[in-house]
Amino acid sequence: MWKKLPVFIFGEAAPDKLPARVRRQIARRQAQSEQLISWVQLLLVLIFATLYAIAPKTGLQAEFQPVPWALGLYFVFTVIRLVFSIRRALPEWILMLSLVMDMGLLMVLIWSFHIQYMQPPSFYLKAPTLIYVFIFIALRALRFDPRHIILAGLAAVTGWVVLVLYVIFSETGNPMITRNFVTYMTSNAVLVGAEVDKIISITLVTLILAVAIARAKRVFERDMFDSMAAADLSRFISPEVAHRITHSDKKIAGGEAEIREVSVIFTDIEGFSTLSEQLSPVELSHILNDFFETLSEIATKCGGVITQYQGDMILITFNAVTKDEHHAEHALTTALAIQDALKSRRFGHGVKLKARCGVNSGEVAIGAVGAQDRLVFTVLGDEVNVASRLEALNKQYGTCILVGENTARLCRGAFAFDEIDNIQIRGRQSRTTIYTPAPA
C-alpha cells in the first residue's frame, strides 16, 4: 500500500532515465516559462505602481517615501531578470536565488508601509498586498517544477513570520497583542490567530500547488517522451499512415480491414543481387537510402503513399490511405516518373540504377496485420499479388513497366498501351492480359 501511495499522490512517473534530447527539450520549455514568469512579474509591478500612483494619499505620510523606492528597486530587479532570461537559460542556483529575492523584495515592500504612513509596525500586517504572495507562488507553476513552488512558499512563510515577530518584539512592553477580533479589526492591534491563519493558508496553497504541479510534471515528461518517440517512429512509416492510425476513432486491431478499390505499384532495383555483391554494406546502404529518397519524392508528388519497404522493394499505394478518385492514372504517372528519373540520376558514388515496376488496380483489404503487440499496416488481396507478379515478369518480357488489365481499363483515354501477352499468372486460375505503356 505504501509503495502505491506516491503514485496515488503524484501520478505515474515518467521513464527512469529520459533521453538527453528529451531533457534538452524540457529545459527549453522551462527556459521559455522563465521568460513568461518575468513578463508577468513585470506586469504585476506596473499594475501595483499604477494603483499606488492613482490611490488618494492621506496627510499622515512621512517625508521619506519608502514605497516608491521599494517598487523602483523591484522594477529594476525584474527587468534585469527578464533580460537575462531572454538572452540565455539561467542556471538553477540563480533561479532559486532570484526567487527568494522576489519574495524578499515583496516583504520589504509590505514592511515599508508602516514607515510610509507613519503607523506602528502592526499596520502592515493588514495590508492587502499580502494577496500578491499567492500570485507570486502561483506564478512558479508555469515552470512545471514543484521545487520552485515549495521554495517560493517557504520564502513567503519565512518572510511573513519575520514580519510578525518584528511587530511583536519591535516595541518592548507594548506588543499590541489582542484576543478580541473586533479590537483587531478596528485598530492596529495584533491577533496572533489571524497571522497563524495566513501562514497556514500560504503553506497549504504551496503544498496543493506543489502536488498538482508534481503530477502535471510527470504527465508533461511522459507526454514529451511519448510525443518525441512518436515523431521518431513516424519516420519509419509514412505520415499518411501515421495520421490514419493516430486519428482513428477506435484502436486499430489486427485483422480489421476496409475494402476499397486502390492502385498499387511494386518496384525494385534491377540486378540488386549483383550490386550487393560488388559493394560494401555501407556503400549499399547509402545507395539504397538515396534511391528511396528519390522514389519517395516522386510518389508523394503524385499522391502515392509508400506503404512498405522490403530490401530494395517498395510498395506504393494510391487511394488506400488518402482518397484519390484518379488513383490508377496517378499510379501509372508515378511509374513513368520513376523511369524518367532513373535515366538521369546517379546514386551513391555515380552508380546508375534501373528499376522494374508492376502496376495493378482493384479491390483490396486495407488494414493492420500481425501480432497484437506488433502490427504492420498494409494492403492485401489478389490484385496486390498480381502487381507483385507483374513486377517480376518485367525481366521475362524485357520491359520496365507492366500494367494489369484493371489499371489499363481505368486509364483508357489518359494513356496509350501496348498489349504484351495474355497469360495465366502464377497462383491464379484465370488468365490476365498484361500491358506496357506505349511510347509517347
Image (cartoon, grey):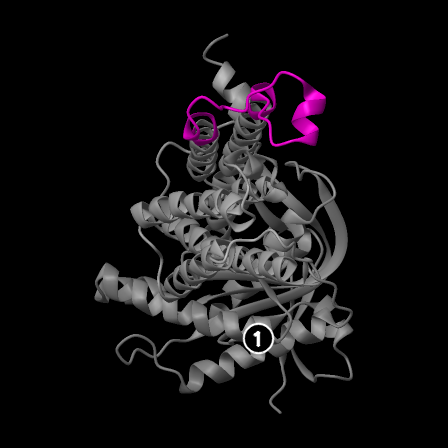
- Label 1 amino acid? Ala
Residue lying farthest to the top in this orientation: 1
Q: Nearer the viewer, residue 109 or 282?
A: 109
Q: Residues within 10 Å of mark 1 (few under 14, many from 20)?
A: many
Q: Is residue 383 above or below residue 3?
A: below
| Residue on which disc 1 sits | 335
Q: Is residue 255 left or right of residue 200?
A: right
Residue lying farthest to the bottom in this orientation: 440
- Image quarter where the C terminus lies is bottom right
Boundaries of the magenta span: 166-195
User: Residue 123, percent across and down?
Assistant: 57, 37
Q: Nearer the viewer, residue 81 or 424?
A: 81
Q: Nearer the viewer, residue 4 or 69?
A: 69
**Dividing the picture into quarters, in which one does residue 416 lie?**
bottom right
User: Residue 111, percent across and down?
Assistant: 48, 42
Q: Is residue 11 visible?
A: no
Q: Is residue 367 above or below residue 436?
A: above
Q: Nearer the viewer, residue 306 or 66?
A: 66
Residue at image coords 55%, 19%: 8
Residue at image coords 63%, 85%: 438
Q: Is residue 72 left or right of residue 370?
A: left
Q: Is residue 412 above or below residue 220?
A: below
Q: Is residue 371 above or below residue 183?
A: below
Residue at image coords 50%, 36%: 121
User: Residue 197, percent across and down?
Assistant: 59, 23
Residue at image coords 26%, 77%: 349
Q: Is residue 5 visible?
A: yes
Kindly state the secondary structure of the residue where label 1 is placed: helix
**Dividing the picture into quarters, in which one does residue 334 lie?**
bottom right
**Residue 326 magenta-highlighted:** no
User: Residue 202, percent across and down?
Assistant: 55, 30
